[in-house]
Image: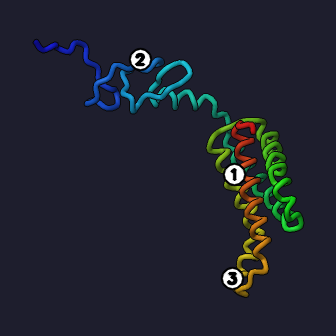
């Protein structure tokens, strides 16, 4: 005897996929590809995206403020790096925290994922600008005279950018 399937549900986003899961917020049927595990159960992508938008509080003017501040402060820090040498490893993360805290105070603790990403990109750009002449000089003279300066700058860029991003995005190390 063949059992008939009664009340078969199909995913709201993939109509060919049978499912028994439902979003615990909007009650739509969702398949395992669409389900996002939250602390309160499974939700569909739209409900998760809508909930995340609540946490994005940045205003339009926070973007240029954070980008300019991040770039300028990172540029100033990168001018000091060639004089620090080994101490770059210790002071670059501190510089990143200082930059992040200045930005956080100026934008009054408003937040948005894209804001943090753009600020990190500005920090990289601000730190790269001082080494462009060193790179050009190395290419033209084909000597390794500025190699150590590039290594310390590279470490500075990595450490300060990761510190700024993680501090702004709320990840505490």
Which dot marks residue 120?
A: 1
> Image quadrant of residue 136?
bottom right
Instruction: Compare residues 141 and 50 and report the one nearer the observer.
Output: 141
Q: Are marks 2 and 3 in contact (CB under 8 Å)?
A: no
Q: In whole angstroms, how far apart are the C-alphas of marks 2 and 3? A: 62 Å
Element type where label 2 sits in the image: loop
From this view, report whether residue 40 is shown above or below residue 80: above
Mark 3 or 1, nearer chain start: 1
Q: In whole angstroms, how far apart are the C-alphas of marks 2 and 1? A: 38 Å
Q: Is residue 12 left or right of residue 52?
A: left
Which dot marks residue 67?
A: none
| Mark 2 Cα-neighbour bin, 10 Å: few <14, some 14–19, many ≥20 | few
Mark 2 or 1, nearer chain start: 2
Residue lying at 81% horizontally and 56% vertically, measured from the top left: 89
Which dot marks residue 27?
A: 2
Q: In whole angstroms, how far apart are the C-alphas of marks 3 and 1? A: 28 Å
User: What residue is disc 3 on?
Assistant: 139
* The residue positioned farthest toward the bottom in the image shown: 141
Instruction: Compare residues 33 and 73 and report the one nearer the observer.
Output: 33
Q: Residue 57 at x, y = what percent?
A: 67, 33
């Amino acid at each position: 005897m063949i059992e008939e399937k009664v009340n078969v549900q199909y995913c709201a986003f993939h109509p060919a996929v049978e499912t028994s899961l439902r979003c615990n917020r909007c009650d739509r049927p969702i398949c395992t590809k669409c389900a996002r595990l939250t602390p309160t159960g499974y939700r569909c992508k739209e409900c998760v995206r809508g909930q995340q938008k609540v946490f994005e509080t940045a205003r339009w003017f926070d973007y240029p403020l954070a980008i300019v501040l991040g770039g300028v402060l990172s540029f100033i820090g990168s001018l000091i790096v060639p004089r620090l040498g080994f101490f770059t490893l210790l002071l670059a993360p501190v510089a990143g925290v200082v930059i992040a805290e200045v930005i956080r105070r100026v934008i009054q603790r408003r937040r948005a994922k894209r804001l943090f990403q753009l600020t990190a990109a500005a920090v990289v750009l601000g730190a790269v600008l001082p080494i462009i002449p060193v790179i050009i000089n190395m290419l033209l003279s084909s000597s390794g005279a500025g190699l150590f300066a590039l290594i310390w700058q590279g470490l500075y860029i990595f450490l300060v950018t990761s510190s700024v991003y993680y501090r702004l995005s709320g990840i505490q190390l």
